[in-house]
Image: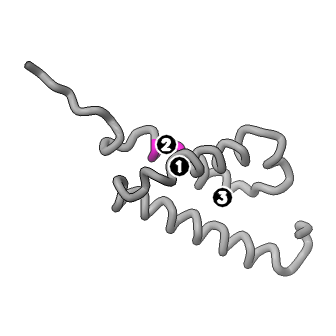
Amino acid sequence: VGPENTCREKLEKTIILYTKVLLDFLEYHPCAFIPLIQRSLEFAVSYVFTPAGEGVAFERFIVQCMNLIKMIVKNEAYKPAKNIE
């Protein structure tokens, strides 16, 4: 969809809504999100850090992808427990 297309704004809003749902799911149900970690990281990295995302990704989407990566990396539920003996 070209930048001048009237559907683009609605598509961008829908994409942002879906990424917000994904981020909320990660925040409130991190253990249930575990099976989605690899695909989510691959998805986010492919649009943010490779040429595949050029021209397709828009600024708010890139920010949401970066937030997804950050939340996965910093999530306390995924860190191993510290055993002090």
Task: Categorize mark 1 by other alpha carbons within 10 Å: few (<14), some (14-19), many (20+).
Answer: some
**Prevailing secondary structure of the magenta residues:** helix
| First in sequence: mark 2 vs mark 3 | 3
What's under tag 2, amino acid-wise? Lys
Residue at figure coordinates x 34%, y 53% from the top left: 31
Q: Is residue 8 magenta?
A: no
Pointer 2 with pointer 1, Cβ within 8 A: yes
Residue 3: image x %, image y %?
88, 67
User: CA gap, disc 2 to disc 1?
Assistant: 5 Å
Q: Quadrant of the C terminus?
A: top left
Q: Which mark is residue 70?
A: 2
Which residue was labeled with disc 1?
67
Residue 36: image x %, image y %?
51, 54
Q: How many marks?
A: 3
What's under tag 3, amino acid-wise? Arg
| First in sequence: mark 1 vs mark 3 | 3
Which element carries disc 3, helix, strand or loop? helix
Residue at figure coordinates x 58%, y 69% from the top left: 18
Is residue 59 toward the left or the right of residue 77 in the image? Answer: right
What's under tag 1, amino acid-wise? Asn
Q: Which residues are magenta?
A: 68-72
Which residue was labeled with disc 3?
60
Q: Quadrant of residue 14?
A: bottom right
Q: Is residue 11 above or below residue 75?
A: below
Residue 2: image x %, image y %?
91, 68
Residue at figure coordinates x 43%, y 63% from the top left: 24
